[in-house]
Image (cartoon, grey):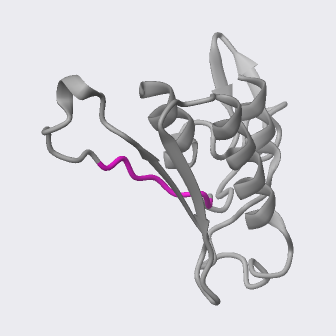
Amino acid sequence: FSTLCDYVKIPNLSPNFDQDWQTNGHQDAAVDLLKNWIISQEIENSKLDIIVEKGRTPIILLEIDATEEIANSPTVLLYGHLDKQPPLGDWSEGLGPTKPVVRDGKLYGRGGADDGYSTFVAVAAV
């Protein structure tokens, strides 16, 4: 949970809303945080790749071999994204887009409740 809170702190906006996304380091910080978290999960028979192409946002690709019991089953793809939408409108008192706050058991902050958290959910599911 603390790593998810650290993820919320990274102001990694979608390239549509951040013209400096290639140079400000937010994408790199998000990728590094997620890469290190995935590695710390010690998933057996897995391979982690970070794919970077000039002018494109990075891709985190985690391949996990099927177990023998389901070796002939179809491939499953879980997808998500790293970037966040800009903070539109007003936030309630004490809340902000890059300030992770837990209230009544809920985490508030950009990336904590939209598809930005998808890597955490996908990896936790396996």
Examine the residues drawn in magenta and state their main secondary structure: loop
Q: Does the magenta stretch include residue 102?
A: no
Give the residues drawn in magenta, as a range.
77-83
Residue 109: image quadrant is top right
The image shows residue 80, relative to residue 95, as above or below, that is: below
For the image, the number of numbered tags is 0
Q: Position of residue 53 (x, y in %)?
A: 60, 84
Q: In this view, does 103 lie to the left or right of 61?
A: right
Q: Position of residue 23 (x, y in %)?
A: 84, 81
Q: Does the magenta stretch include residue 79?
A: yes
The image shows residue 67, relative to residue 10, as above or below, that is: above
Q: Where is residue 124 in the image (x, y as percent from the top left)?
A: 50, 26
Observer-nearest of 9 and 69 = 69
The image shows residue 26, relative to residue 2, as above or below, that is: below
Q: Please tell me which residue is depicted at 78% across the width and 64% down the height of the picture.
A: 28
Q: Position of residue 15 (x, y in %)?
A: 63, 77
- Residue furthest to the top in view is 104
Quadrant of the frame with the N terminus: top right
Q: Is residue 95 left or right of residue 49?
A: right
Q: Is residue 78 left or right of residue 5?
A: left
Is residue 97 at least partly visible in the picture? no
Is residue 18 at least partly visible in the picture? yes
Quadrant of the frame with the C terminus: top left
Q: Please tell me which residue is depicted at 14% across the width and 38% down the height of the picture.
A: 73
